[in-house]
Amino acid sequence: MSVKLLKYIVSNSCIRSRVHNMKYMSTVNNDKPIKVTFNKANGDKIIAEGKKGDSLLDVIINNNLDFDGYGACEGTLTCSTCHVILDSKDYDALPDKPSDEELDMLDLAYNLTDTSRLGCQIILEEKLDGLEVKVPATVNDARD
Ligand code: FES
């Protein structure tokens, strides 16, 4: 093996290693756990973790949480069973306001409040770490 070829291999290996490490660091930052507390109507408080980009529905599914009937349409904005209620401070802090489609679906939810949202439309980001939501006792599946 020539010295030139050996230098090329070592150089490329170092570059690949650095790129791999940068990707790893990026992945680690994106996967930083974001804590969410679900307060059920019966008084149960369930604390779960998600990651940036997860919806509240993803957090419930990925943690195998038992929320009867929750997320029936799997986030396709056709059921309203993922209704959650936030306090006004957290509601105002959400990065995205509800779309017209979400508002239409919320109109069909039981126990609607001024700070209601659909859990499948709340996307986690780091600043939402510690978010608390109330989960109403009853759900309305708008598809029925
Ligand atoms: S899961 Fe059906 S509207 Fe959110």
Image: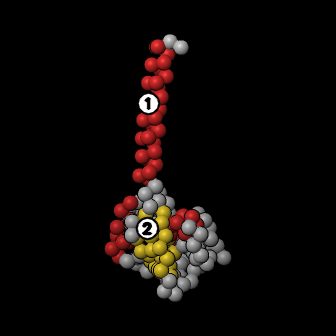
In percent of width and height, residue 99 lies at: 46, 64
Rounded to the nearest whole Å, what is the CA distance between mark 1 and mark 2?
Answer: 36 Å
Q: Position of residue 74 (x, y in %)?
A: 60, 65
Closest to the observer: 58 or 113? 58
Q: How many marks?
A: 2
**Could you tell me which residue is drawn at 52 percent across and 87 percent down?**
42
Residue 83: numbered disc: none
Residue at the extreme bottom of the image, as rendered: 42
Q: Specify whether residue 40 is in view.
A: yes
Q: Is residue 43 or residue 77 the one in the foreground?
A: 43
Residue 141 lies left or right of residue 96; in this view the side is right
The quarter of the image holding the C terminus is bottom right
How far across and how far down the image is residue 93, in percent?
A: 34, 67
Which residue is identified by label 2? 35
Element under label 2? strand
Name the one closer to the observer, 87 or 97: 87
User: For the residue carrying disc 2, how many other residues have a C-alpha within 10 Å: few (<14), some (14-19), or many (20+)?
Assistant: some
The residue positioned 44% from the left and 70% from the top of the image is: 36
Q: From the top left corner, tell me how far across and down residue 65 is, in percent.
A: 57, 72
How packed mark 1 is, by other alpha carbons closer than 10 Å (few <14, some 14-19, many 20 or more), is few
Q: Is residue 55 above or below residue 117?
A: above
Residue at coordinates 46% horizontally, 35% vertically from top-left?
17
Q: Residue at x 40, y 71 (%)?
A: 131
Where 138 falls versus 90 (above or below)? below
Q: For residue 129, which quarter of the picture?
A: bottom left
Towards the viewer: 37 or 93: 37
Residue at the top extreme, as displayed: 2
Q: Which residue is mark 1?
A: 15
Name the amino acid, label 2.
Lys
* Amino acid bearing label 1: Ile
Residue 121 visible in the displayed image: no
Q: Nearer the viewer, mark 1 or mark 2?
A: 1
